[in-house]
């Protein structure tokens, strides 16, 4: 048994303790019984340790027990968005190469023809609890790959794919050891105990919801309050009613919540709010802290690290606005273009290594040893570290704009635009320019799109950029838009923006 499964087993050993709320509280005994029921169904269908099982379920109790059943059985869980359209699933199946599927009935109805075209047949349905039915699908054995196993800690656990915000997703195969190390880092940095109640509103098919919220809370002995997704109207009521102590958010959620009144009676148990997955505007963090009286902890993570890489500390530790904090339980370097470490405050690419970090992407070779040891992942994120070890993210290497040979960081421009009180969010990309090679174009989403004078806001933003940015860095065009294309965790999909035709009006 892996350390992770052993820790989960011990955490779920008390049959009288309630752990998961999804319409009602479930005891540890109920969770264990439902996990075993799904595991027995998988075993009966021939699932062996190392087989890939696509888990396409919304946030629900059914997801929790299906996910834990895969881990317990030794299968490789391949989490999938149960609401993806058929065309996207067609592309995803080629990456997943799943042997089996645990699918929500609604998704099974939409995807049925495509799954059958990929040699899947529908097997038994299992009622996880109170009508939360899951369908189990099996692919014909003729093309199923051989099961993969390893030692308990090296046993593959979860196969995920990078968000693909700048290109094609890459496969990230996380082992039981990666997940266990990541859980320990989260528990230590956030001081999680059995007294904590986490609020799960982020999608569980992404790493944040899975590791930061679900696994870390279960292993620490805490309880989880779960919704199918974020509902602004329920946010504070759930926190108050269930005594929530911390919430893992993305900046978009915090921006929405910051606009609504904060009922004081909801703050009696809340310890902190956590923000990751995208840059957090300092103004939003300040508004939330002033309204709630609890710290907003900005963090940085990625799938390749099974979740968390850096986080700002809880009080009394110092939180630095604009920084994602310090690395926790792992090594981090800032390196130049030749992969050599740079001095504090020098800009470079972030490289990471640790027990929670993969050594290479699925199907790819590990990076060479550049003189400071093997096992490093080069994240593609650009940033710098100050003299206290705090990390600052400035953007993605692939997103840098090359204007006549001068490299321009989109994040620097976005920080200036986001400082305007009427701006909720912005995104800057480089588009082709016949004279300079590339030009910076900004998309800006106002706080109140229906109440804004787009031309007046654009003029104010142009003046703001003129005051704070050198001429080559100023956007050649500012598009006032109602929304930005984002993925499920709130990351802007800049490759989509680069394929749009920018228009000088409210889009």
Image: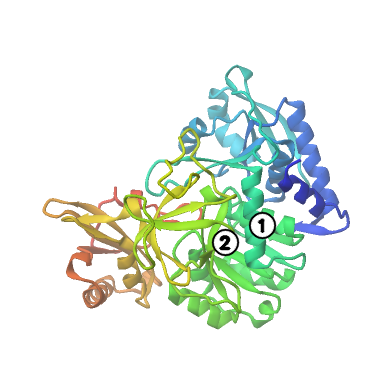
Query: Could you tell me residue 34's position as x and y percent?
Result: 80, 43
Mark carried by residue 328:
2
The reply to whether residue 200 is in sight is: no
Q: Earlier in the sequence, mark 1 or mark 2?
A: 1
The C terminus, quarter of image: bottom left
Give the side of residue 127 with respect to residue 485, left or right: right
Position of 100 relative to 26 (above/below): above
Question: In the displayed structure, does residue 130 sit left or right of residue 248?
Answer: right
Question: Which quarter of the figure is the N terminus placed in?
Answer: top right
Q: Which residue is drawn at 65% across and 82% down?
A: 264
Give left or right: position of 42 versus 430. Answer: right
The residue sitting at 80% across, 48% down in the picture is 9
The picture places residue 179, in percent across and down from the top left corner, at 63, 48
- Compare residues 203 and 22 and report the one nearer the observer: 203
User: Mark on residue 184?
Assistant: 1
Question: Counting other residues with Cα less than 10 Å from the Cα at mark 1, is it few (<14), some (14-19), or many (20 or more)?
Answer: some
Q: Does residue 269 sit above or below 343 in this rendering?
A: below
The residue at the point 30 percent across, 61 percent down is: 409
Find numbered disc 1 in the image and state the secondary structure of the residue it sits on: helix
Q: How far apart are marks 1 and 2 (CA)?
A: 10 Å
- The picture places residue 312, in percent across and down from the top left corner, at 54, 69
């Amino acid at each position: 048994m892996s350390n992770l499964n052993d820790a989960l087993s011990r955490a779920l050993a008390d049959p009288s303790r309630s752990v998961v709320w999804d319409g009602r509280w479930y005891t540890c005994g109920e969770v264990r019984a439902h996990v075993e029921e799904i595991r027995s169904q998988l075993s009966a269908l021939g699932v062996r340790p190392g087989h890939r099982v696509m888990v396409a379920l919304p946030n629900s109790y059914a997801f929790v027990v299906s996910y834990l059943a895969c881990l317990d059985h030794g299968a490789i869980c391949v989490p999938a968005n149960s609401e993806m359209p058929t065309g996207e699933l067609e592309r995803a199946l080629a990456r997943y190469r799943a042997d089996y599927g645990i699918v929500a009935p609604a998704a099974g109805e939409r995807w049925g023809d495509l799954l059958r075209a990929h040699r899947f047949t529908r097997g038994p349905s299992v009622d996880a609890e109170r009508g939360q039915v899951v369908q189990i699908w099996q692919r014909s054995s003729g093309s199923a790959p051989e099961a993969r196993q390893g030692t308990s800690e090296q046993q593959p656990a979860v196969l995920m794919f990078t968000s693909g915000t700048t290109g094609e997703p890459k496969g990230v195969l996380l082992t039981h050891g990666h997940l266990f190390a990541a859980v320990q880092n989260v528990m230590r940095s956030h001081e999680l105990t059995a007294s904590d109640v986490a609020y799960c509103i982020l999608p569980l098919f992404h790493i944040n919801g899975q590791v930061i919220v679900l696994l870390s809370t279960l292993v620490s002995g805490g309880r989880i309050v779960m919704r199918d997704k974020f509902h602004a109207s329920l946010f504070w009521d759930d926190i108050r009613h269930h005594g929530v102590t911390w919430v893992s958010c993305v900046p978009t959620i915090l921006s929405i919540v910051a606009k609504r009144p904060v009922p004081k009676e909801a703050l009696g148990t809340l310890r902190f709010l956590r923000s990751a997955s995208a840059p957090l505007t300092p103004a939003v963090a300040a508004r939330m802290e002033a309204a709630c009286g609890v710290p907003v902890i900005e963090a940085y993570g990625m799938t390749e690290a099974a979740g968390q890489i850096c986080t700002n500390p809880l009080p009394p530790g110092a939180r630095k606005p604009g920084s994602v904090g310090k690395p926790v339980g792992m090594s981090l370097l800032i390196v130049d273009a030749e992969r050599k470490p740079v001095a504090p405050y020098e800009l470079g690419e972030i490289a990471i290594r640790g027990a929670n970090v993969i050594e290479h992407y699925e199907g790819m070779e590990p990076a060479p040893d550049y003189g400071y040891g093997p096992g490093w992942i080069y994240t593609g994120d650009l940033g710098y570290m100050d003299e206290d070890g705090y990390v600052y993210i400035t953007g993605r290497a692939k997103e840098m704009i090359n204007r006549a040979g001068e490299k321009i960081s989109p994040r620097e421009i976005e920080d200036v635009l986001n400082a305007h009180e009427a701006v909720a969010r912005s995104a800057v990309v480089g588009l082709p320019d016949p004279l300079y090679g590339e030009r910076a174009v900004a998309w800006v989403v106002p706080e109140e799109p229906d109440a804004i004078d787009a031309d007046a806001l654009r003029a104010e933003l142009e003046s703001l950029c003129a005051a704070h940015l050198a001429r080559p860095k100023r956007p050649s065009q500012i598009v006032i838009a109602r929304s930005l294309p984002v993925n499920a965790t709130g990351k802007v999909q800049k490759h989509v923006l680069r394929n749009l035709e920018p228009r000088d009006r409210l889009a």
